[in-house]
Amino acid sequence: MVSHRSAAALWGMLPDRIEACVEISVPGDGGRRKRSGIRLHRSATLGPDQVTRRLGIPVTTPERTFSDLGPVVPPHELRNAVRQAETLGLGIGTDATHDGTRSELEFRFLQLCERSGLPAPGVNVRIGPFLADFVWPAERLIVETDGYRYHRGRAAFEADRKRDLELRALGYDVIRLTFRQVTERPAETASAIRVAIATPRSLAQKSDIFRSKRQSPPS
């Protein structure tokens, strides 16, 4: 049956990329000759309850597929598989923990907060019509992590700025961070977040500031 990366692609947990070999698992540890285009895995623990069909193709179950992925894919791909499985409603077992992040950049920022001793933010919190990446509600602070791949282009730039204005009108400060700021300048980034958290303003104060900026004539 299809297994490992090939099974993850079949289930939609990983991107369906063109691979040189299809990964196949067979139960038991008996010898089987190698075949071109097939990466063969032999397993003494693969039982009938860990096999099903998808699109008519014999494949390991989502839970077994996720278990097989652990030793063979980088950690960031494994985290992406968890996110995709949750989005698709696939049961992948109690060993799969999800921190609420929707991208690798969000995961890295959450790690940055933990390593730097910052208060834990809410992750992907609904505020009005928006889903904010990270929120400190009491401090009225939002952090948005902008990976270039998902935020390039003029239309996205304009939409982000419109979104920021509306969130500020609701009384929140908005800080946008790039992949480089999170991964290459973590100390500087953590310091800026710490200052923002340490100097909270009330909703009324922030709304007043926003109104004064909006109403003041251009210089």
Image (cartoon, rainbow, N blue to C red):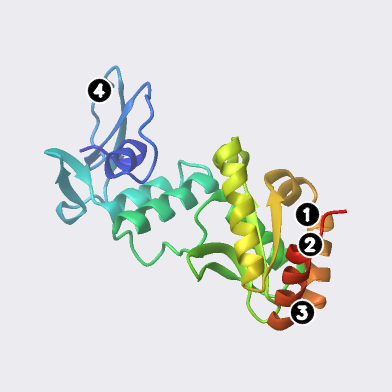
172, 7: nearer the viewer: 172
- Helix, strand, or loop for circle 3? loop
- Taking the image as drawn, is residue 202 in sight? no
The residues tagged by marks 1 and 2 sit, at their Cα atoms, a distance apart of 6 Å
| 127 to 36, vertically: above or below | below
N-term mark: 1 or 4: 4
Of callouts 3 and 1, the N-terminal one: 1
The residue at the point 82 percent across, 77 percent down is 199
Rounded to the nearest angstrom, the CA distance separating label 1 from label 4 is: 50 Å
Residue 167, compared with residue 144, is above or below; it is below
Residue drawn at x 25%, y 22% as measured from the top left: 33
Of label 2 and label 4, which has the lower sequence position? 4
Pointer 4 residue: 33
Q: Nearer the viewer, residue 188 or 204?
A: 204
Q: Is residue 98 left or right of residue 192?
A: left
Give left or right: position of 135 versus 184: left
Q: Identify the mark nearer the N-term, 2 or 3.
A: 2
Q: Are marks 1 and 2 in contact (CB under 8 Å)?
A: yes
Quadrant of the rendered image containing residue 198: bottom right
Amino acid residing under circle 3: Arg
| Mark 1 secondary-structure assignment | helix
Mark 2–mark 3 distance (CA, rounded to whole Å): 19 Å
| Helix, strand or loop for disc 4 | loop
Q: CA distance from mark 4 to mark 3?
A: 69 Å
Q: Nearer the viewer, residue 36 or 161?
A: 161
Q: How far across and how far down the image is residue 109, in percent?
A: 66, 57
What residue is disc 3 on? 201
Asked if disc 2 and disc 3 are in contact, CB closer than 8 Å, the reply is: no
Say which element carries label 2: helix
